[in-house]
Amino acid sequence: MALSKAIRALIGLPALLLAACDDGPKTVSHFSRPELIPSMLTSASTKGPALVVIHGSPFPERDEVTQTVVLETMMRAVTWRKTAFTLNAAEASEPETRIIWAFGVADNLDARKLCRGETPPAASDDKKIKVRAVFCARDQLLSDVSGSIKTVAEPQDAMFDTLISQVTRTLLDKG
């Protein structure tokens, strides 16, 4: 009897693991110019930090903490080159080349509009944190990635960190 319970538990384990994975971060690459990404990021960050623009926040009451977490996680995620990031356009060495994060936006967002400087309309989802990230040089889209996780309580949550890390690596992948 005990053996059959153990066997049933083992048989159910893959389904349990898959269910747990459903809550984990999901990323989708919509567009990428991998032949341009390394040189553009290097150029944008050689003489100073690369510019990051953040629209919206999954934690509006903790915007500064969220911004700090995003920047620090991005720096750890770019492993092929030491890269600093800033939210201040005056500090950026090439502010025309930038990474834009848009939290809480609709799935059908036109990423090229972000590169043109348009502020995306918000679309709320109480069950998920959704983000769209783009890497732009002037109006040119170099990379476009979306990601989501189940809603978490704070920006320091490991799941949020993993989402930002995965999106950053996918966005700035060298191909």
Image (tube, rainbow, N blue to C red):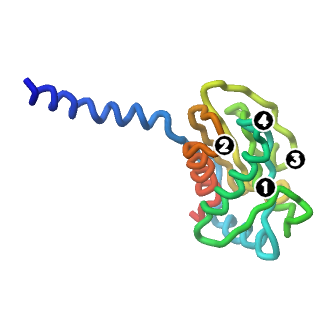
Residue at 74% x, 47% y: name it: 65
Give the alpha-carbon distance from disc 4 to disc 3, as whole Å.
25 Å
Neighbours of disc 1 within 10 Å: few (<14), some (14-19), many (20+): many
State left or right for residue 17 relative to residue 84: left
Query: Would you name the residue on which mark 1 appears?
Result: 52
Quadrant housing residue 89: bottom right
Query: Would you name the residue on which mark 2 appears?
Result: 155
Residue closest to the eye, 46 or 34: 46
Amino acid beneath label 3: Gly
Neighbours of disc 4 within 10 Å: few (<14), some (14-19), many (20+): few
Residue closest to the eye, 161 or 123: 161
Q: Looking at the picture, how far across and down is residue 168, in whole percent?
A: 63, 55
Query: Would you name the residue on which mark 3 appears?
Result: 117
Give the alpha-carbon distance from disc 2 to disc 4, as whole Å.
11 Å
Residue closest to the eye, 175 or 131: 131
Q: Which mark is residue 170?
A: none
